[in-house]
């Protein structure tokens, strides 16, 4: 009988191994489908899906150009090294393809790490692995680990969950040799995590988890500190600024000099660094398609499930606290932390249903089966499980279909690469495009994604928001630290170019409060460019977006509305302007050359129209100060500062 029971136990392990392997391969298959679809849409285009992708691709290209020298390998993160090893050449299309090929592998590894995290002391339940599989296909997490999104997020979740799982496993073994061996393995994993992510701050959290879980396991303090020391030793070979890294991340996201975070103080609005309201929580965590109140109940139930699971074994409270601290960070600090918490909520939902069914005296296996059926039903509300096997139009919601940067930036960069002298000259552009321009051009750049929260960003905004173009010109020149080019014994004045593009102008509502100009800071947020559709109504009137606009006296619905009207050509060449109503707060811009007042109109807030930024965009520039060198209106213009 003993031999039979041993064989059954062995067969269960083999079956679970095969099942988990099948799910991992299925995850790879789903991600490959996503890559193929992405490639069909963006084939041959110099675009990714996030601003940081070009940073990692550039590092990969630099590494290849330096022929993988030892020094360059030490200075390059593991993501860029992996891209460089896979890529066939330094061409962008090859590098982005190599980056995309990493996504199926990284997703499969992350699935295995999350599954291991939840399967500890769960009797090897296969349903835990199914829940882990589903959680990775929740859109917020799936898109950040999809094609085009070349970022360390591809494996950050993997490292956090795997190291946490092994810390808990370490607390549950009695053999000291095995504990020390695991401490060394954990240290090696953390070393790889640091080389991948570039931040050492997580080391402090991992050490707390090791000390706390071993204390609950009643290990002696001598061995507790010994295990923690072994764990720290290997990461210290790479970087030792653990507290400095943790402090910088805390200052950046949470608190800075006793006040608000550096991000909040900067007034720079980055989508992933914003905080979504509680009504959005169900949609982000579960992609809940119905009323938010019902979905919020789902979130609360899931939280309760996680608490039940944690208190099953007190060692979990310390060993697993790291992923759980991201729950409040997700809710109250920044949306980007949801990538760490989404798997917790899916598992919590499954676990609480399972516990409830067991309390009703149902069989454990039946309870788990009912719990997984309900969990699959919630998942199927936003994504059909048939998409795992047959990819069609109904399945594209999980593919990263947004591009970065926008077409106006890529076209301008292509022109600059072909027609402007870039070496030793400076291009001023919005920080969002910094990594892309650094990768695709050879200009000196004052603003980039690495310093968006610094003073230069606010100074740049102050410059382009000046009403006096002469002041704006001087402020823009003062931003440029590269004053002279040295060519042998000759010194040539550094040329300064300014990129004014539609995407940048349309983002004004997101960054206008960076300025120190008081009358702009107090403005209410409103679109900087608002296209309107109009039809003729009377001799001097037209109906625009259900509003009656008088284009002779500037009245809108019989009250002052339009301050002035600007006439320009389709190519963005300024023709003339006419004051309509001194009390108006908007400017009507017409691109029909005064031939048809009802066609091709946009509304611009008066204060925006008076800034140098909008004047340059609409072609109202001072020739003595600015020289137009590229015009692809309405996409973008490039000016040279005289």
Image: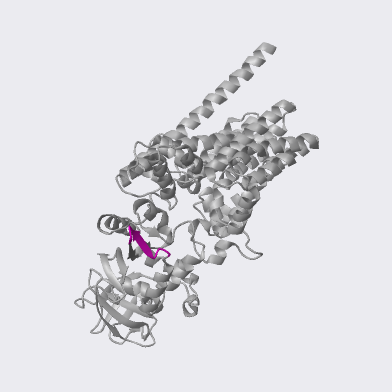
Q: Give the range drawn in magenta.
A: 481-489
Q: Which residue is at a point 56% across and 66% down the rendered structure image?
A: 265
State left or right for residue 208 relative to residue 605: right
Q: In this view, does 390 lie above or below 549?
A: above
Q: How many labels does the image show?
A: 0
Q: In this view, does 154 lie above or below 257?
A: above
**Which of the 4 quarters of the picture holds residue 87?**
top left
State left or right for residue 183 relative to residue 215: left
Q: Quadrant of the N terminus?
A: top right
**Which of the 4 quarters of the picture holds residue 223?**
top right
Q: Is residue 325 magenta?
A: no
x and y percentages locating residue 35 in the rendered image: 38, 40
Is there any visible trace of residue 171 in the rendered image? Answer: yes
x and y percentages locating residue 140 in the rendered image: 49, 49
x and y percentages locating residue 106 in the rendered image: 48, 37
x and y percentages locating residue 55 in the rendered image: 43, 49
């Amino acid at each position: 009988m003993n031999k039979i029971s041993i064989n059954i136990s062995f067969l269960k392990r083999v079956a679970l191994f095969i099942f988990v392997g099948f799910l991992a391969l299925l995850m790879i298959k789903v991600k490959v489908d996503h890559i193929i679809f992405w490639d069909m849409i963006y084939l041959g285009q110099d675009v990714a899906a996030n601003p940081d992708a070009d940073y990692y691709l550039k590092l990969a290209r630099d590494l290849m150009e330096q022929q993988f020298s030892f020094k360059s390998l030490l200075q390059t993160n593991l993501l860029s090294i992996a891209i460089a090893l896979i890529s066939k050449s330094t061409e962008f299309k090859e590098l982005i393809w190599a980056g995309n090929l990493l996504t199926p592998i990284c997703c499969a590894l992350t699935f295995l790490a999350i599954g291991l995290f939840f399967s500890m002391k769960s009797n090897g339940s296969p349903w835990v692995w199914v829940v882990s599989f589903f959680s990775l296909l929740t859109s917020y997490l799936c898109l950040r680990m999809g094609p085009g999104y070349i970022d360390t997020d591809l494996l950050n979740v993997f490292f956090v969950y795997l190291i946490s799982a092994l810390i808990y496993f370490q607390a549950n073994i009695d053999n000291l040799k095995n504990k020390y061996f695991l401490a060394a393995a954990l240290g090696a994993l953390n070393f790889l995590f640091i080389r991948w992510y570039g931040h050492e701050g997580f080391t402090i959290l991992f050490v707390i988890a090791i000390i706390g879980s071993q204390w609950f396991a009643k290990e002696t303090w001598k061995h507790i500190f010994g295990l923690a020391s072994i764990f720290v030793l290997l990461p210290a070979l790479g970087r030792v600024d653990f507290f400095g890294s943790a402090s910088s991340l805390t200052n950046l996201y949470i608190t800075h000099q006793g006040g608000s975070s550096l991000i909040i103080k900067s007034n720079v609005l980055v989508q992933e660094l914003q905080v979504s309201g509680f009504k959005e929580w169900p949609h982000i965590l579960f992609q809940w398609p119905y009323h938010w109140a019902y979905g919020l109940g789902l979130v609360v139930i899931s939280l309760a499930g996680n608490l039940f699971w944690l208190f099953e074994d007190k060692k979990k409270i310390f060993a697993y606290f790291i992923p759980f601290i991201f729950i409040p960070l997700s809710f109250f600090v920044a949306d980007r932390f949801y990538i760490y918490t989404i798997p917790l909520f899916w598992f919590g939902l499954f676990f609480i249903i399972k516990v409830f069914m067991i309390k009703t005296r149902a069989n454990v296996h039946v309870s788990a089966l009912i719990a997984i059926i309900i969990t699959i039903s919630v998942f199927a509300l936003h994504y059909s499980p048939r998409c795992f096997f047959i990819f069609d139009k109904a399945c594209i919601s999980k593919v990263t279909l947004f591009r970065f940067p926008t077409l106006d930036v890529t076209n301008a960069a292509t022109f600059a690469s072909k027609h402007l002298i870039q070496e030793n000259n400076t291009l001023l552009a919005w920080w969002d495009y910094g990594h892309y321009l650094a990768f695709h051009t050879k200009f000196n750049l004052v603003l980039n994604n690495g310093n968006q929260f610094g003073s230069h960003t606010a100074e740049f905004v102050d410059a382009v928001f000046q009403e006096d173009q002469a002041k704006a010109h001087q402020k823009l020149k003062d931003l440029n630290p590269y004053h002279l080019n040295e060519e042998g014994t000759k010194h040539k004045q550094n040329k300064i170019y300014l990129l004014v593009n539609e995407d940048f102008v349309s983002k004004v509502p997101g960054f206008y409060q960076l300025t120190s100009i008081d009358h702009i800071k107090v403005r209410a947020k409103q679109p900087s460019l608002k296209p309107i559709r109009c039809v003729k109504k009377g001799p001097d009137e037209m109906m625009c977006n259900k509003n009656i606009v008088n284009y002779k006296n500037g009245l809108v619905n019989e009250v002052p509305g339009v301050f002035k009207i600007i006439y320009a050509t389709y190519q963005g060449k300024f023709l003339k302007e006419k004051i309509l109503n001194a009390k108006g707060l908007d400017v009507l811009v017409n691109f029909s050359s005064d031939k048809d007042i009802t066609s091709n109109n946009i509304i611009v807030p008066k204060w925006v129209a008076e800034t140098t930024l909008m004047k340059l965009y609409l072609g109202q520039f001072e020739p003595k100060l600015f020289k137009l060198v590229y015009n692809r209106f309405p996409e973008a213009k490039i000016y040279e500062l005289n």
